[in-house]
Image: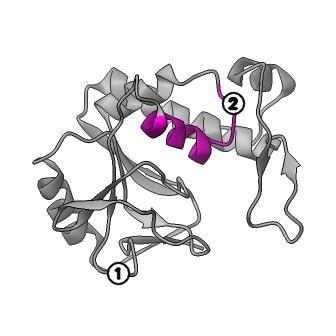
């Protein structure tokens, strides 16, 4: 995937875009998405398209600024096994360093049900979640916020889970 999108590609993402706020900015203001955010969205959407086309049950989506725990494979294997007990769409396995873990209630020993995922840098996407994400198009906001809309739309009835080892929140992958 290219690290940029041209104007034609941006129009294809959606003609009506909503302004959002960059919480990382020194002086946060409401603004439209940048070309970089649109490029990132295309990559997340491509993962959803690939997942559906491949028939694979889920895919691990990672952005390029993630750090893994030293036991990632072991912990991910255990978490995926744990997830098999519930119907899920998106399972966050990390959170942005500047956001607290989302609110929710425990549904499994290491999974909380929630309607928000503050960042989209590390998550598992199921077939159902991929369909819900693509059905949320056209893109109206940055991909992490667009992902949140599928959990908040009762028509899609998405089930967001996030991994949590303890009260500090997801620890499998961190964004840096």
> Residue 162: where, in percent of width, then height?
35, 59
Residue 50 visible in the shown view? no
Using the image, determine if residue 13 lies above or below residue 121.
above
* Image quarter in which the N terminus is found: top right
Side of 73 relative to 33 (left or right)? left
Q: Is residue 13 magenta?
A: no
Mark 1 or 2, nearer chain start:
2
Using the image, determine if residue 164 lies above or below residue 157.
below
Whole-Å distance between the Cαs marked 1 and 2?
33 Å
* Image quarter in which the C terminus is found: bottom right
- The rendered magenta stretch, by its main secondary structure, is classed as helix
Q: Residues within 10 Å of mark 2 (few under 14, many from 20)?
A: many
Residue at the image position 57 percent from the left and 75 percent from the top? 97
Side of 30 relative to 119 (left or right)? right
Using the image, determine if residue 52 lies above or below residue 42.
above
* Residue topped by disc 2: 140
* Residue topped by disc 1: 167
Residue at the image position 69 percent from the left and 37 percent from the top? 141
Which stretch did the figure color magenta? Answer: 139-152
Tag 1–tag 2 contact (CB < 8 Å): no
Using the image, determine if residue 84 lies above or below residue 54.
below
> Residue 88: where, in percent of width, then height?
26, 42
Q: Is residue 142 magenta?
A: yes
Q: Secondary structure at mark 1?
A: loop
Side of 119 relative to 126 (left or right)? right
Q: Secondary structure at mark 2?
A: loop
Residue 128 visible in the shown view? yes
> Residue 121: where, in percent of width, then height?
52, 57
> Residue 130: where, in percent of width, then height?
40, 31
């Amino acid at each position: 995937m290219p690290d940029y999108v041209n104007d034609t590609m941006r129009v294809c993402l959606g003609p009506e875009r909503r302004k959002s706020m960059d919480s990382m900015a020194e002086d946060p203001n409401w603004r439209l998405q940048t070309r970089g955010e649109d490029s990132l969205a295309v990559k997340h959407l491509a993962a959803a398209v690939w997942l559906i086309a491949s028939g694979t049950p889920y895919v691990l989506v990672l952005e390029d600024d993630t750090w893994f725990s030293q036991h990632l494979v072991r912990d991910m294997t255990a978490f995926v096994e744990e997830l098999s007990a519930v119907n899920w769409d998106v399972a966050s396995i990390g959170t942005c360093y500047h956001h607290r873990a989302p609110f929710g209630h425990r549904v499994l020993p290491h999974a909380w049900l929630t309607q928000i995922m503050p960042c989209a840098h590390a998550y598992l996407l199921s077939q159902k979640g991929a369909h819900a994400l693509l059905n949320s198009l056209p893109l109206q906001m940055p991909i992490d916020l667009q992902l949140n809309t599928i959990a908040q739309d009762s028509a899609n009835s998405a089930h967001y889970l996030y991994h949590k080892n303890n009260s500090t929140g997801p620890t499998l992958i961190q964004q840096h």
